Image: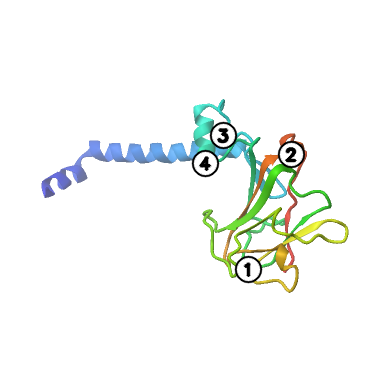
Amino acid sequence: MSGIFSWVASSGVVQGVIIGATLAFLTTILVLDGVAKAETTTVNGWSSIRRAGQPDNGLLVRAALQKALPVVNVFEEAAYWTTSVDSAGKKLSGEHAYRLHFPPGNLPPNDAFWSLTATDTVGYMVSSPTGRSSVDDHSGLVTNRDGSVDILLQSQAPSGLAQNWLPTPTGRYKLMLRAYLPGAAILDGSYDVPPVVRVA
């Protein structure tokens, strides 16, 4: 057995195959990431991929979008936005408190429901003191006097508006906003998700 390992270690052909396979893998990753970036639209720090899941995407686009946003519905069934930065372009962190302010009548338009979730940077759910991992249009959110809605994003419980609090991880994290059966303003591209603003 040791003879085989010695041969592999000294064989230029085997080493060439290993190096070639590694370079091919890295090149594939770079190409897929580049294609996904070209298909991504970012507004107010929120990124979305409108063509994800489309059956007429070519093989390369399908592979790139599957890598970037795996196992998603087509945009017409569920619109997805993600962000890991605030309005100043700084990484979201549980060390700070943020506010997501929706002007009156500007919650994500939909014919089903919308949901906002906080996850770790990989996308895994994290435990919170309340057991709540998301807020949505069934969370009993409290509106402001003018009809606007503020969602509080922080790791510690706020002094008020507990219904509007989405507990966040204590470290770096990202947010995902989803609208199921998105409304016309989302489908035609005229709807923009507000920026996440740091308040403390």
Which residue in the protein does label 3 denote? 53
Q: Which mark is residue 155?
A: 1
Q: Give the percent coordinates (x, y) of residue 158.
A: 71, 71
Amino acid at pointer 1: Ser
Q: Is 55 on the left-hand or right-hand side of 112?
A: left
Going from the N terminus, do you reach mark 1 or mark 2 first?
Answer: 1
- Report how far apart the C-alphas of labels 4 and 1 lie in the structure: 29 Å
Q: Give the percent coordinates (x, y) of residue 177.
A: 65, 50
Amino acid at pointer 4: Val
User: Which residue reaches farthest bottom?
Assistant: 159
| Circle 3 residues within 10 Å: few <14, some 14–19, many ≥20 | many
Select label 1 or label 2 by which is in front: 2
Q: Is residue 198 above or below residue 108?
A: below
Q: Do residues under tags 1 and 3 come within 8 Å of each other at their CB atoms?
A: no
- Report how far apart the C-alphas of labels 4 and 2 lie in the structure: 21 Å
SS class, disc 4: loop
| Circle 4 residues within 10 Å: few <14, some 14–19, many ≥20 | few
Going from the N terminus, do you reach mark 4 or mark 3 first?
Answer: 3
Q: Do residues under tags 4 and 3 come within 8 Å of each other at their CB atoms?
A: no
Select label 4 or label 2 by which is in front: 2
Q: Residue at x 24, y 38 (%)?
A: 14
Which residue in the protein does label 2 denote? 183
Amino acid at pointer 2: Gly
Select label 4 or label 1 by which is in front: 4
Which residue in the protein does label 4 denote? 71
Q: Is 145 on the left-hand or right-hand side of 34?
A: right
